Amino acid sequence: MLAVVIPIALALQGLAFLLTVARLLRGPSLPDRIIALDTLSINAIALLVLYGMVIDSTLFFEIALLIAVTGFIGTVALTKYLQRGDIIELR
Amino acid sequence: MLMIALVALPFAGALIVQLCKRAGATAAFAIAAVTALAGLGVLATAWPGIEGGTVFAWRREWLASIGLNLSLRLDGLSFTFALLIDGIGLLVTVYARYYLPRVASTVRFFTLLLLFMGAMLGVVLSGNLLLMLVFWEMTSIVSFLLIGFWSYRSEARKGARMALTVTGAGGLALLAGVLLLGRICGSLELSDVLAQGGMVQRHPLYPAMLVLVLLGAFTKSAQFPFFFWLPHAMSAPTPVSAYLHSATMVKAGVFLLARLYPVLDGTPWWFYIVSLAGLITLVGGAAMALLQRDLKGLLAYSTISHLGLITLLFGLDTQLSTVAALFHIINHAVFKASLFMAAGIIDHETGTRDLTRLRGLWRYMPHTGALAIVASLSMAGVPLLNGFLSKEMFFGETLAQDLFGYFNWVVPAAATLAGALSVAYSLRFIYGVFFDGKPDDLPNYPPHEPPRLMKFPVEILVVICLVVGLVPNITVGALLQITAAATLNGPPPEYSLSPWHGVNLPLVMSLVSLVAGTALFYFRREAFHRHHETLALLNARDRFEDLMRALGWVAARLTAALENGSLQRYVALLVAAMVLLPAWYLLGAGTLPFPAAIGALRGPLPPAPLDPATGAGLAILALGAVVVVGWRRQRVAALSMLSLCGLMMVLLFGRFSAPDLALTQVTVEVVTILLMVLALYFLPGDNGQSPGRTTPARWMRDGALALAGGAFTSAAAYAVMTRAYDSIGEYFVRNSVSGGGGTNIVNVILVDFRGFDTFGEICVLLVAGLGVQAMLKGLRLTAPQFDINGSPWAGQSHPLLLAILARLMLPLTLLVAVFMLLRGHNLPGGGFVAALVTSIALLMQYVASGVLWTESRIMVNYRVMAGAGILLAGLTGLGSWFFGYPFLTTAFGHFHLPVIGEFELATAMLFDLGVYFTVVGTTLLIVSHLGVRDKRILASTHDHNGGR
Amino acid sequence: MLKRLFPHPWLSVVLLLIWLLLVNEASAGHLLLGALLGWVIALLVGRRLWLRPMALRRPDLMLRLAGRVLYDIVHANVEVAALVLGPMRRMQPAFIQVPLDLDHEMALTALISIVSLSPGTLCAELSDDRRVLLIHVLNLRDEARLVDTIKSRYEAPLKEIFVCLPS
Amino acid sequence: MHPMVELVICVLLLIGSGFMLIGAIGLARLPDFYMRLHGPTKSTTLGVGGVVLASVVYFSVRGGGLSLHEMLVTAFLFLTAPISAHMLAKAAIQHRLPVIERTRGRAWTPGRSVAEADRDDTECPGPDHP
Amino acid sequence: MNQALLLPLLVPMFAGALLAMMPARRQTWQRGVSVAASLALLPVAVWLLCVADSGAIPVVAMGNWPAPFGIVLQLDRLGALMLVLTAVLAVAASVHASCGDARLGRHFDALFQFQLMGLNGAFLAGDLFNLFVFFEILLIASYSLLVHGGGARRIGPGLHYVLINLVGSSFFLIAIGILYGLTGTLNMVDMGVRLQALDASSQPLAVAGGTMLLLVFLLKAAAFPLYFWLPRAYAGATPSVAALFAVMTKVGVYAVLRTQALVFGLDTGPLAGFMHGWLWWLALTTMAVGAIGALAAREVRVLTGYLVLTSVGMLLAGTSLQTYDAWAAVLYYLPSTTLCTAALFLLAGALDTRQEPADPALERPAGKAGGRAVKRPGMRMEGALFLVAIVTAIGLPPMSGFIGKTMLLRATLGPGAPAAWPVILGASLLLLVAASRTGSRQVWSAPYVRHGVRSPGRRVVLRRWKLACAMFLLAGNLALVLFAGQVERYVDATAGQLTDTPAYRQAVLGTPAQGD
Amino acid sequence: MEAAFAVTIGVLTASGLFLLLRARTFTVVLGLTLMSYAVTLFLLSMGRLATARPPVIMDGARYADPVPQALVLTAIVISFAMTAFAIVLSLRSLGLSGTDHVDGVERP
Ligand code: NA
Ligand code: NA
């Protein structure tokens, strides 16, 4: 059963990934691109977890975890740049 | 020993002069004089041996590989020259004592004079051709300093440069010639070389070698067409001129002709090149001398002319001509030195050397006048003076030669003409300076006789002119005999030294030239009047300066054309070189036709099938890269695309079994984006109006280069991947647990097997951090007031939600960092990733709450932290020394504690901790410093259209 | 004194839990190590890098809220899924303002997170005085009911759970 | 592996992946930025949640012990996703991204009054010089 | 005993780390540590030279992991020569810097020490990737040092230098990758062994990788057409930095020699000598371009930059010949040219400043009134040292440059001579013209007198120290002349050692030559 | 798979090189980053492509060649440091010349 479902899951997620990439490419605004990027990192987490199951290895958990812990910072930096320009301000 | 002393004495003297600088000018003079005297003494002791035909030789090995030995040789030829150098050197020293003002620079003068003397003695005494060249070039350099002695005078600097350039060029040619000669003879020892004259002339390299050697000789001796530097060397102090242009510097060239005579002479190459150069120089120099307004200029061109005479004699095809050349070398040295000194006295006493201003000095300085007149008559070749004797021999030899067939008569005719000219300019000197009315146009009036001792050297030289002219056999007969023998490397031909040989053709030629010269002098205005303007155009110094300036201009244009300051060009060249040449080799370096070469790239390994997910991932990565290129002007959008690429890298690392890489990529990506966004703030917007749009040609070039680079890496990667190999990786797999104590092989490689690389890597990090901090000091940047759409920036600097969340995440993230650090040895993770996670958690505080808030709470000096990390890593590595193991040897053990159970400790972890500290410290050092604390933001009004 | 040694007991406990999750085992050694790390990190973070002092009350309510939120998230997910897959013109997007009455920033954060995580609503802005929340709603049917739901279903329990302490 | 367990894993996987896709569809289809901003929350919550739960079950069964650490991924995402959304919304307001016409209410941002925001909509103050 | 090989790395490393941690206000302490660390390098390097001169090749396996698996450091005659050269430069440059240059910006001393570490590491590295790492250390330190002091003259060329070298580093990694991908090893000696056994179909790949590697080194060496970063960078750098940088291009030459000897093998193998043809022409062009650039130069520092370039051409021409004599010539010429150009850079600091008055109001043209220029006191000494240095650099007798040049001329005497000799001699002539022009302008015509100098006493002391540094370097040149016989024996032995691949195999891999 | 991987490397290299040949510092930094991606993948591919074989010792499996991974890690870190330096230097140049042109002057 798993052997059937996993490719399906992979396909669904792959499609999700591609759609999100399309949004990244299409924009039209910068926040649109950033949101696509943010979503892509979440997709990537799911893909990594899935891939860990595919190859029966727990070694990919940490990658997913690190994306979850640090991935949003890119979004924060870019959005803050759009708002304030300087992302590390004096006060 | 004698010879060593002879050469070393002046150098030692120069050293002593410099050491006793404080003692003043007189002491310097005394040392110089004593040195020259000592040299003469040494020569005197050598005389009996020399007279008996002994050749003194001394030799020490120095540099076998280039055949340069410390080898000295004193024979008749070098004895004569050494005698001139030391003797006239002594007289010049005495003269200079009175000529130069007694100021500090006089010490420098005597130092240089002694150095020159030493170099010159080195040239004539070298028994090794390369050693001779060493001294030869030294004379060029020291003469440069002597000519430019009064360096504040523009003409002195220019004259010095010109002399150096011409003689230096000749020296380089001579170097080539000498090396070729050494190759032909198999040795550079003079004794070996002189022994195989005939062989040399049959060697195919002989013409090249001869031309190169002659270039050296002709430049030094101011032969046509290289004569032009010499007149301008007259801007040297007169003692220098008296020394360099009578007995030493310019004589080095003719010395070389004499020295290598047995090796070089005897071929048409030699006869024609040497005699023609000499002939042209002889006549041309004499004519130019007549046209000079400057007293020293007249003497300079006369020197050129006399050197041409000597050269011509060497080039003639009779043995006796060589004897005549040697005789004239001696005579010319004597009368020319005295003339220069006399000219110096005149200059010194009247304040001018301009022949149009000088006149009627006889009444004021008869003593000097008498001396100068005798010397100039000798120069003119008037009987009973030494110049007459050698000139008579010269006329004789021009008749005896048989080089030019039907045109043989040209040589004696030209010689007579030159003789007439020399009579004319000598008369001009005598009449113009001492008679011709009253001296009413002198800077110093009235002129008077110089100090007694200043005339002393001139007197001695003039006496020699007279004595040699009257009784040549007694005075110079023996000297000339042994000189000729040494030069010809065999017994000299029969000749007779006597003022009177009866009425013969040479005497007639002498008389003709005397009469014609007098006539020429009488009609000089009519004859030369119109050539004054032409002469101005021929000012060699200006032409030379023009040439040099043009050369410099061309060089500057060439350089500017090459280095136009455009990085794009440099990178394009770099990429072109880096890609095209390796690609050429990759495709078989032309041995294979193109399709076959492509086909040969594919190796034997079967390719793995491509699954759709991986294919899609690779495609997205590639697409992302291309889109980054397309969006490069919309910077934020490009950055988002770059982030996509980074994310795809992470996924691909996961896919291709590199979890450690994926972890590292995730964290590095975040910090890099932070950095880039920080930079983005200050970069002026590219709103489509800035200049420097890519032209189509540039587009094509860059596109082609980029595609070539891409094709190369593709091809190389594919070629390697389809080939089998045998990796050292197997060893690491086998030894990771047993030898390194960890199951994460990559980490064990990083901290143990190849920990040294990691060590270097953290050094790179620290240095980058230090460099960034140094660069940011005092940096002023203008910050835009509007966002990329032209609106004012948002008012809220630190959204509450962000600040709270950042603080909330801090302890959690730190925990994750510790987790990464501790597990790294066995599972993906490690000090670097842990450090970046820590840094990101802290950087989050900077972003969310600002620099002041954060740094008032995190009181850590990041720089110290980074340095401490390196120290920790280094000390960990050093620790193994104390146990007798090499640097960075790790130890690990499994320990058991109650409750906790079994755990592992490894020194590698300590090393990793050092890595951790360095990376945290550096990352924060770099990024936090880009925060506003160290940079000064100046408000500006420029808008900021970076995005879409 | 105890306060200084254990500045954030709750944090330490949470860290211990997370540590155990991270290492994915509950051995005695890791329990000890986790406790140690929880303590040390809390100490490092101290009072200045962390939030204002607070107390967590009503663990029961906390669990109930968690369950409620999870349920709402699942529910909203299904709801929004239908919206997304269905015709777009049916949707009635809106910005609404929700007046707030929360003291501690932790509670505020929790509320914003809940609102944002449930599909269909999204916190767009917070006023400077922290008293008004701007929410974007994907498909607004009844503004008053939504505001009321947020206030009663989430804000009220949060107010009870997070209690400000004097610093 | 027990078929029931396998079934659970399969269902969880399909739910998770399905919601990931729906989130992506939302991101692709929805007509304005603020609406699109709702898309990722589905991926974050049920999407990743489903996949992670599947992984938890899978490895707990395979590894012979409870494996809960994947839950941490979701936990961290729950912490960070709202902040991303919040910051994105703020950026969008700063950039005055258009909303579809039928959107009720008006976006505002602290630091600029509502009145100011109103004016922004009518006239766009560009930079001082073109 | 072998562990002592690490000293040239550890001394600057620890000094650098300590300096990095020191507070910025502790200027005197920083200078002290820096100078002391540089001074300490000299005896170590000389001692290692003596060790290497015995003909042995001591090897240290880092972390006790044997080659080819672990990273090894190896000391041969070539490496020891470079170590001594670097140490000499380090002493002069660090003392010179402590007389003022170091204060122009932050972290000079720490960066300086790490630069030394990178250099020394490169000279000892036996592992190709480790060589890359040390290259990166020395590069990153050089980036910072180059822009030390700031100003448009440094930042602009600095940016070019950095970006060009970053591109170069990428290609370095690709080259290493190809070679690793083919051989599966990183140890240079082992790589050489495995390359010999490479099947014919993979050889184009190996040559391509090797070519790229050589090009990377040629970029560091500043060979045409990869030299563009050099002239402005060197002209802009602070004198102390430029002096140390005199050795940077030689690192490229060193690396070419090193890889030629160890990896691509001179004795056997299909890869031997594959670079000869094109490198020869590139070298000659470099020489010509350098000489032309020198002719265009108007300042001593610019002139010196082009002298460096010309010397690179000489060195590479000799290197490309791959004969015993030519390599010996290269090895003799290398220290000679490095020392004298370093001295010139130090002197340029004094000679060039007079042409750019700090404040026109403070400068008045002298010599108009009195007819004689009033010179700044004691510039005579700078002038004399300049003369000695420039004579050495151009290759005029009696200094060491002449010997080196003559060795090279002798070594090229053969089929290559018709191309090489005119270029070498012509370049020398152009350099002579250029040097006499620039030199006489900067040294002789001294039209400015500087007034209002604060604390002239201290200035005099500092000036003496600076002169002493230049003298120290030139004394090295003098030693190369006085002990030319000994040096020649050493460089002959070095060239011999480099061509003796089995000796390296024995020392590094512990096995007698395999595969042949 | 090898061919696709190789082509991806090629595209990354080409894009990176093209950006490196541009005139604005920011673009050049983008190019450096892409180039470093390309180099990273290139180095990784030198250990041949291995899927599902992470080099972490488990029981008895085959492992990917760990050496290129270690090299890449070092290379990534160094490239990170270099990129940071280049960014700050370009800011320094901007502060001095007022332009973000790599040559410090606007060129026509
Ligand atoms: Na003759
Ligand atoms: Na007159």
Image (spheres, coloured by chain):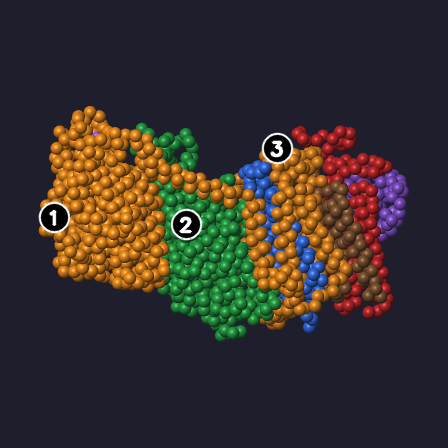
Chain colours: A brown, B orange, C purple, D red, E green, F blue
Amino acid residing under circle 3: Ser
Give the residue pinned by disc 3. Answer: B940
Name the residue located 28 percent from the left edge and 30 percent from the top edge: B529
Residue B501, disc: 1
Residue F78, disc: none
Q: Where is residue E245 in the image (x, y as percent from the top left)?
A: 46, 51
Q: Is residue D48 left or right of residue B683?
A: right
Q: Where is residue E490 in the image (x, y as percent from the top left)?
A: 38, 63
Q: Residues within 10 Å of mark 3 (few under 14, many from 20)?
A: few
Amino acid residing under circle 1: His
Chain identity of mark 1: B
**SS at mark 3 in the image:** loop
In three-dimensional space, the C-alpha distance between marks 3 and 2, rounded to whole angstroms, equals 51 Å
Task: Find the residue positioned furthest to the front.
Answer: B406
Callout 1 and callout 2 share a chain: no
Name the residue located 77 percent from the left edge and 68 percent from the top edge: D62
Residue E427, disc: 2
Amino acid residing under circle 2: Ala
Q: Choose mark 1 or mark 2, whichever is in front.
A: 1
Q: Is residue D122 left or right of residue B76?
A: right
Q: How many labels does the image show?
A: 3
Name the residue located 44 percent from the left edge and 55 percent from the top edge: E419
Q: Position of residue A16 (x, y in %)?
A: 80, 53
Q: Choose mark 3 or mark 2, whichever is in front.
A: 2
